[in-house]
Image: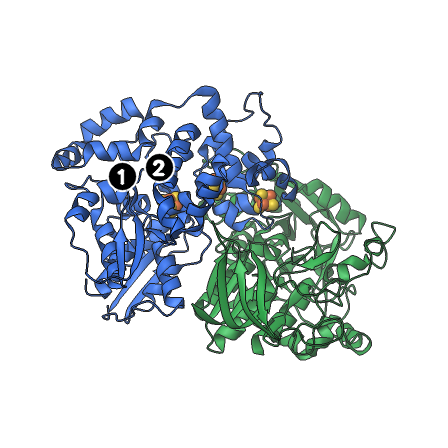
Amino acid sequence: MDHIEFSLTQSLDHCIKCNVCTSACPVAAVTDKFPGPKYVGPQAQRFRHAGQPVPDNSVDYCSGCRVCNEVCPTGVKIVELNARARAQIVAERGMPLRNRIIARAGVVGRLSCGPHAPLVNAGLSIPPLRWVIEQIMQIHRAAPLPSASSYTFRSWFKKHQPPVGARKQVVYYHGCSTQYYEPHVGKAAVAVLERNGYEVIIPTQGCCGLPLLSNGDFAAAKGRHMYNVESLLPYVRRGIPVVGTSTSCTLTLKEEAPELLGLHNQDVRAVAAGTYDIFEFLRNLYDAGDLDTNFRPIQRELPYHPPCQLRAHRIGMPVLDILGLVPGLRLNESHAACCGIAGTYGLKKEKYQIGMDVGAKLFAFVQAANSDLALCDSETCRWQISHGTGVATKHPIEILAQAYGL
Amino acid sequence: MNYDTIVIGAGIAGMLAAIGRAEAGERVLSLSKGHGATHWAAGCLDLFDIGAGDPLAEIESLIAVHPDHPYALVGVDAVQAGAGRLRAACEAGGYPLVGSLRRNLQMPTAVGALRTTCLVPATMAAGDARQLPRSGDGSGPLLIAGFHELRDFFPPLVAANLCALGFAAEGVYLQVPPTERTLDFGTVSFARLFDRPTFRADVGRQLRQLVQRGRYSRIGMPAVLGLDNATQVVSDLQAAAGALIFEIPTLPASVPGMRLYRALETALQRVGGRIQIGAFVRHAEGRGNRLEAIYSEAAAREQRHAAARYVLATGGIAGGGVRADHAGNLVETALGLPLRTPNARADWFAARFLNETGHPVFRTGVAADASLRPLDAAGQVIYENVAVAGSALAGCDPIREGALEGIAAATGWKAGQL
Ligand code: SF4
Ligand code: SF4
Ligand code: SF4
């Protein structure tokens, strides 16, 4: 019996019904459509049985932000219960077309990215067209869709000249958003890693499968995950770490996919244990005395939102630790539970407003900071913050590259 | 990242220890597995339950006869200083605690009984039983007001039980003012609504009408009167109603407990402390009599944390800092420290559930010296760079003694000064 299987049957009894989770859930705080983690998680689970219809649909309104897991004092795996319950609904009733499409970030990105990207982007900014998309696809007309890049990250990397004499190697997992929408994040990551003496390797890789997991298509997600495991395993076996700039991709490789899909063989475990968030990796370098700390001062004070997908790694705030070493730079942590987008959640027509209401506290924080720039490790989060505030956003690795003068 | 001090546990004990060390200029990290202690408790400071007497005097005599009790380890000065630091943190958050360490208070509960405590938030102050109207004393009666939509708080029941104790009380249900929320109200959803001026103005109008009709002098309401700005909410309601208003603690999630946690959290952040929740510390690595590192549960692999010194403030059996393993042994969950414990499982519990002298198992904890360093069975210091604070300490039964927050504040404060 795997970990979650175990909590489905056993750790439910660890729930002491204290309501701490429901009090912290950012979605339950803003909508009546969602009764909160205690109810849809440990409580409703008692009424879910294989072969019987799903007792309640409201679990679909869980955004998967994991705030409940973070605060539960008894360690109930609420989010995992919710994700599996949603997958049961999808298995019973099938998945709406819209979810099928947005769950395939890679495919959408591949179609929009390239020299024709400006056209696609212009099209997506035409209100009538967005209205049509909303009608047909149920993607909210105002939701923050990313702008496709006119070149892919991999095409840039192919032409990139690696430094000579690197003695260490590291694998970079770029994920969909760096590949199709934000190649500049990947460029900054490569620059920082090379500056620290690494040769950066970029093996073939597919989407991590998180959007499929969060939309309940477990079968497709399993295919994605096994593809990545196969591709990354040879490196991990040689002791080469895998690092990523997307906190949700790295979390999926580390934990979400193995746990939700019940994949626990040696290969899956080895890849999980060899995967790092990039700032977590840099912090380990620092702890070992191996990080280049020759930073140029940056006299700035910037608002920083640690995304919930980062907090779900349960590794603290490596961005604050590392950027705290840059002279002059001060980051102010948002202390907001969630930006509301939760991957694809806030794009959906019926959930867009919930997402904006969830994000209101964060938006107010960013606006009050009176800065023309905010930092966040997660891409969908950055798009949502910019959408909610009009303030430009960057991945912290871009600031670190700047501090190195790269 | 190297910290000067890592504190495990984010209840009152852990937070006061972290604040103390950070105020002294240390780099401090607070690790906790979730929200606990504060969010479950009433948000008051229980010092020692001797009914309506002088708890500090009682602690002084306790110290004389029980040198192993946590109060005895740290002394009366620490009790006063700890309570004082907690008050200061709350005060700074605009949420003052009131009362005196020299006189216990008796406060109405959500079932209309009286509960002994010592310091209460100002939002509860008018519930002090000494001031409540008694039947036949000629003053206007007490009104207990709640909402049908708030589960587990039944004004007629509260009022009836208070009447049985000789108070003059009536219960009433108020109408929930119009809101976009229609379903499933919990304590925190009500608190957020009360933070809105329009919502509390509407409730204030209802209360005023009731006061005009019933000549009520005081009104008791569930402790959901605002999360961000409770002091203001209560004073607005009093002004509107024309009567004194006090909060009565509810079942968890406890809004007053959350306010207390927030005040401590803000105080710690203000002095530069780092807070990481969702970090369940599971084991430790020591060398000789020094603790070298601790490991918290994380995605895919554990996270290692290292510091010069550590404070263990994970709570006792009720807080999850002590639990029974599958072999039936009690274990301290974070560092694996030995426990001073009743020997065999058969000795854990007394025969009666509501036993007069309590159940021995709840006295389980880590034995410590006057510097709160953990001791083994032979009385030797196990780690000289660890201090233990709060209910994780042996020699007390904090819930039974009615001393939960008092012990936490005294030992937590002390650990912060070491
Ligand atoms: S926080 Fe944990 S223990 Fe409390 S109600 Fe939620 S799931 Fe249950
Ligand atoms: S994952 Fe987030 S939205 Fe879902 S129940 Fe937990 S806190 Fe609420
Ligand atoms: S977008 Fe950001 S804050 Fe929002 S759900 Fe994702 S990671 Fe969490």
Quick one: label 2, few (<14), some, or many (20+) residues within 10 Å?
A: many
Instruction: Please provide percent x and percent y for residue A93.
Output: 45, 20
Q: Which chain has been coloured green in this picture? A: B
Answer yes or no: do the residues labelled 1 and 2 have beta carbons within 8 Å?
yes
For the rendered model, the colour scheme is: by chain
Q: Is residue A199 left or right of residue B386?
A: left
Pointer 2 chain: A
Say whether mark 2 is within 8 Å of ligand 3.
Answer: yes
Of B183 and B317, which appears nearest the observer? B317
Which residue appears at 62% of the width and 54% of the height?
A: B246
**Helix or strand or loop: what does disc 1 sit on?**
loop
Question: Total of numbered circles in the picture?
Answer: 2
**Helix or strand or loop: what does disc 2 sit on?**
helix
Quick one: label 1, few (<14), some, or many (20+) residues within 10 Å?
A: many
Sooner in the amino-acid sequence: mark 1 or mark 2:
1
Which residue appears at 19% of the width and 39% of the height?
A: A148
Give a yes or no on whether discs 1 and 2 share a subunit: yes
Of B273 and A293, which appears nearest the observer? A293
Q: Quadrant of the N terminus of chain A?
A: top right
**Residue annotated with mark 1:** A144
- Place residue A175 in its image quadrant: top left
Label 2 amino acid? Answer: Gly
- Residue found at the far right of this picture: B351
Q: CA distance from mark 1 to mark 2?
A: 9 Å
**Residue annotated with mark 2:** A346
